[in-house]
């Protein structure tokens, strides 16, 4: 271990973050896949604007499930998911005309007529969420949106929420029926929700709209109490409640019309079915809640929208008390009508190696809509069913904190004289540990006519004090590589590696590096021609540090080696930096009295370590 003199001089600077990109709003772009060439791993898109070589992308099929359409209790149950929910991550190796070609062979199969989208994933060194971060809302007409995906090589700091809540499948649309209840005959599981003429009433809706799901029904079947896959059913005429939307768990049923006077008929909607994820090889939006049947309420929001999808890959997440969520939204409330079902919780995938503080992660189902019976004698209309909880996948560390995957509650009955209601809550969702997200391990044929250059990829990773270089090439001929490293503007040759016939993938380890930033490049010398790879940069953090707080002495201790220009910071509960120090020289440990801080909870951190501590009354 290196020994350094203890240096006590430091600068007090305005609180700044290093190597940080501020992000907020919508950071992804969405592209409709309209054709696939599996041989070349090529995807024809509606628009390739903004997509470049080496971009990270996600391919995801939104719909395509086959469901039972018999007029029975099994209406809408899934007979086959087909390719619905298939997804994978990949890297772009070429963009030509209206198509992108992937570095990897496609792992899954897709049906482009069932709404397949490609999502461009931004990649950051470190990022700070400065205002709400969210995806574009899902648009079924374009087949795009609803997915928030980011990759952060080092630290992701939350100074605002990350949310795909209510961005998934839409809820059943609200419609105010202009007719009345001529008779109690509307018991089918599917109706055409388009208003019709029934007896002497016009604009009658026999069954309210179902929530959107992984299966698209024809308009002739898109209304009525039968659920459709993970979309909740719509309440039947008259004034029955809509069912909740679902994900991998069962959604709640809509309440029946239990009235003993006026219009009657117990035809509350069925909640969305639990989908089969096949251990996470498929991922889904939360299903939309079904609309309740209404003929009195002036306006309602209809069924709740399902939660969207969140994918985060990062070395470290600093939550600062902010939430990562993909919740379903609440169903619409009504007065003197059937209320609507809540949306199903969405999907969250977290590939995070370290959390500096307790995390708050939510994929809750939306509550069912409440119904106001207006204290009229004999009236007892149907409340909305609760949406089911969603699913959270942890690829690496499971954080301390709160994981909320609860199902939504059935709607509340207000001003009612009826003894009971029949709506139900959505079921709790699920969390999965040791999850491996979908990405093909096999290289594609993105070469020759498809790829104009020899470099398929060049990427770097770090472990302790070692940099790992990995690359792949084609069309090299008689050649060799020179591995070069730059620091302080000088390129140093580290190794010469021969090209081996029929071999495309190579690697090199650069060990025993001191803390600092290094750049690498590869020089390919082939038939006296020289070709350079892109330049890749790595940050070596050096030996392990730890930070601790002693309540009695009111001191913070940083143990381990500290490098020149390293930064130490303290953040308050709002995420505001209240203290910062930049070290002017190398040190072996350091401590500092923080008695000047007010009582409360704080986070102390460097680039390599962090701790949460509480300053209490003294």
Image: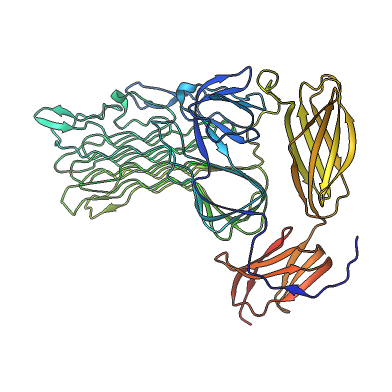
147 or 436, nearer to the observer: 147
Residue 349 appears in the picture as rendered: no
Residue that protrudes farthest toward the front in the picture? 528
Looking at the rendered image, the quarter that the C terminus falls into is bottom right
**Percent x, y of residue 277:** 55, 32
Is 596 left or right of 148, judged from the image as shown? right
349 or 268, nearer to the observer: 349
Residue 321 appears in the picture as rendered: yes
Taking 170 as reference, is 42 above or below it?
above
Is 560 left or right of 233, judged from the image as shown? right
Q: Quadrant of residue 607?
A: bottom right
**Percent x, y of residue 62:** 48, 30
Residue located 29% across and 30% down the image: 223
**Percent x, y of residue 107:** 63, 25
Residue located 88% across and 49% down the image: 512
Taking 281 as reference, is 548 above or below it?
below
Taking 417 as reference, is 501 above or below it?
above
218 or 44, nearer to the observer: 44
Residue located 20% across and 30% down the image: 195
């Amino acid at each position: 271990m290196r020994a350094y003199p203890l240096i006590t001089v430091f600068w007090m600077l305005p609180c700044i973050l290093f190597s940080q990109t501020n992000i907020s709003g919508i950071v992804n772009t969405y592209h409709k896949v309209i054709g696939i060439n599996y041989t070349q791993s090529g995807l024809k898109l509606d628009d390739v604007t903004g997509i470049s070589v080496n971009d990270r992308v996600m391919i995801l099929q939104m719909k395509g499930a086959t469901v039972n359409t018999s007029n029975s209790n099994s209406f809408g149950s899934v007979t086959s998911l087909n390719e619905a929910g298939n997804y994978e991550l990949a890297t772009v190796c070429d963009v030509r005309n209206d198509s992108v070609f992937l570095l990897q062979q496609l792992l899954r199969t897709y049906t482009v007529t069932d709404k397949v989208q490609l999502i461009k994933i931004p990649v950051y060194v470190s990022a700070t969420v400065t205002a709400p971060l969210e995806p574009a809302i899902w648009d079924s007409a374009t087949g795009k949106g609803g997915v928030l995906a980011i990759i952060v090589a080092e630290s992701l700091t939350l100074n605002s929420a990350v949310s795909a809540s209510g961005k998934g499948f839409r809820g059943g649309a609200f419609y105010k029926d202009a007719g009345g209840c001529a008779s109690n005959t509307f018991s089918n599981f599917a109706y055409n929700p388009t208003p019709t003429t029934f007896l002497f009433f016009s604009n009658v809706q026999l069954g309210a709209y179902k929530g959107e799901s992984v299966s698209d029904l024809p308009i002739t079947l898109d209304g009525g109490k039968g659920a459709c896959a993970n979309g909740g059913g719509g309440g039947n005429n008259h004034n029955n409640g809509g069912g909740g939307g679902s994900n991998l768990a069962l959604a709640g049923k809509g309440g029946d019309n239990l009235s003993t006077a006026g219009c009657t008929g117990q035809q509350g909607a069925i909640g969305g079915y639990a989908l089969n994820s096949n251990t996470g090889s498929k991922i889904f939006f939360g299903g939309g809640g079904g609309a309740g049947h209404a003929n009195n309420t002036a306006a309602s929001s209809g069924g709740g929208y399902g939660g969207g999808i969140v994918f985060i890959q990062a070395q470290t997440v600093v939550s600062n008390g902010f939430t990562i969520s993909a919740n379903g939204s609440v169903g619409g409330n009504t007065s003197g009508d059937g209320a609507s079902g809540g949306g199903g919780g969405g999907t969250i995938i977290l590939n995070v190696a370290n959390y500096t503080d307790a995390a708050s992660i939510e994929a809750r189902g939306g509550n069912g809509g409440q119904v106001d019976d207006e204290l009229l004698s004999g009236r007892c209309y149907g409340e909305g069913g609760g949406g089911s909880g969603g699913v959270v996948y942890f690829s690496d560390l499971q954080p301390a904190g709160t994981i909320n995957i609860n199902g939504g509650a059935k709607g509340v009955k207000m001003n009612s004289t009826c003894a009971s209601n029949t709506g139900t809550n959505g079921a709790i969702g699920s969390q999965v540990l040791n999850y491996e997200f979908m990405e093909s391990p096999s290289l594609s044929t993105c070469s020759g006519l498809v790829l104009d250059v020899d470099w398929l990829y060049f990427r770097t990773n770090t472990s302790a004090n070692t940099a790992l270089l990995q690359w792949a090439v084609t069309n090299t001929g008689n050649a060799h590589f020179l591995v070069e490293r730059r620091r302080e503007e000088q390129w140093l040759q580290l190794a010469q590696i021969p090209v081996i016939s029929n071999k495309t993938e190579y690697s090199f380890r650069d060990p025993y590096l001191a803390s600092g930033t290094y750049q690498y490049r590869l020089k390919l010398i082939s038939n006296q021609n020289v070709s350079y790879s892109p330049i890749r940069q790595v940050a070596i953090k050096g030996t392990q540090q730890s930070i601790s707080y002693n309540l009695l002495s009111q001191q913070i201790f940083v143990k381990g080696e500290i490098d020149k220009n390293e930064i130490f910071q303290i953040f308050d509960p709002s995420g505001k930096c209240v203290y910062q120090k930049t070290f002017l020289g190398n040190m072996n440990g350091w401590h500092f009295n923080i008695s000047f801080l007010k009582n409360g909870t704080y986070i102390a951190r460097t680039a390599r370590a962090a701790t949460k501590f509480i300053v209490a009354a003294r």
